[in-house]
Amino acid sequence: MSNKPASSVNVRRIITDEECQAMIQKSLRTPMVRFLRQQLEKAGCPIGDNFFRAVYCHQKMQGAYISGEGVTVCTNYIRIQDEVNQVVTHELIHAYDDCRASNLEWTSCAHHACSEIRAAHLSGDCHYKRELLRGFTKFGGQGKECIRRRVMQSLATNPDCAGTAAKDTIEAVWEKCYNDKQPFDREP
């Protein structure tokens, strides 16, 4: 039994932009983020620390990659360092895709879906421990179900992926995009 008043039991503290920016800086020192930044530089797309910004987001999301601008981490949907690390890793995979594909068009449902499949798969978003923390307890095939679910959530923000277009597009690009492990030599 909690001694806290009922109104404060499930209240989520919003971290400040400064706290989030410090967490972003800490994430830049993780092995996965360092590796992705090195690979971006090798691909001809070096990024500086100012590529990452902490902002209050009006959409329900933890972060976003915006081509030509960088990565935003949403202060109002992030609570802990691990979430920041995960968001930065996920968004850097999008940045890598944007860098290596000269014709990537984010409004294209197929291009968007492919990058989301890769980011969800390669970033560890759908690791079984993360899924358990989200309340998803299925063990067999959980990883691919998680990737499909998270891609559908992301595509819902793309007006070019309305209705059944998102699901149909995911199925159409799944094999190619799921099996594309670049810049890794194997699944991380």
Image (spheres, grey):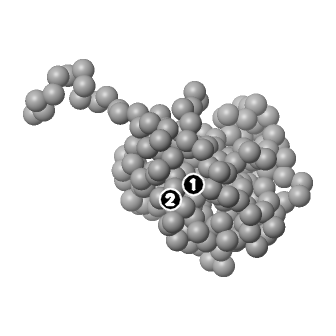
Q: Which residue is mark 2?
A: 27
* 170 lies above or below 34: above
Quick one: SS at disc 2? Answer: helix
Nearest to viewer (mark 1 / mark 2) = 2
Please tell me which residue is depicted at 60% across the width and 44% down the height of the picture: 53
The residue type indicated by label 2 comes to: Ser
Please tell me which residue is depicted at 72% across the width and 40% down the height of the picture: 166
Q: Is residue 95 left or right of residue 129?
A: right
Please report whichever mark, 1 or 2, sits nearer to the chain's N-terminal start: 2
Viewer-proximal residue, 169 or 25? 25
Q: Which residue is mark 1?
A: 88
User: Within 10 Å of the Cα at label 2, are there few (<14), some (14-19), or many (20+) other Cα atoms?
Assistant: many
Estimate the x, y position of residue 120 in percent, counting from the top left. 59, 55
Please tell me which residue is depicted at 76% across the width and 31% down the height of the picture: 159
All told, the count of numbered labels is 2
Q: CA distance from mark 1 to mark 2?
A: 7 Å
- State the residue lying farthest toward the right: 103
* 32 lies above or below 91: below
Please tell me which residue is depicted at 89% across the width and 54% down the height of the picture: 103
Viewer-proximal residue, 161 or 37? 37
* 71 lies above or below 58: below
* 117 lies above or below 39: above
The residue type indicated by label 1 comes to: Val
Residue 72 visible (yes or no): yes
Q: Are marks 1 and 2 in contact (CB under 8 Å)?
A: yes
Residue 131 visible (yes or no): no
Q: Is residue 54 left or right of residue 159?
A: left
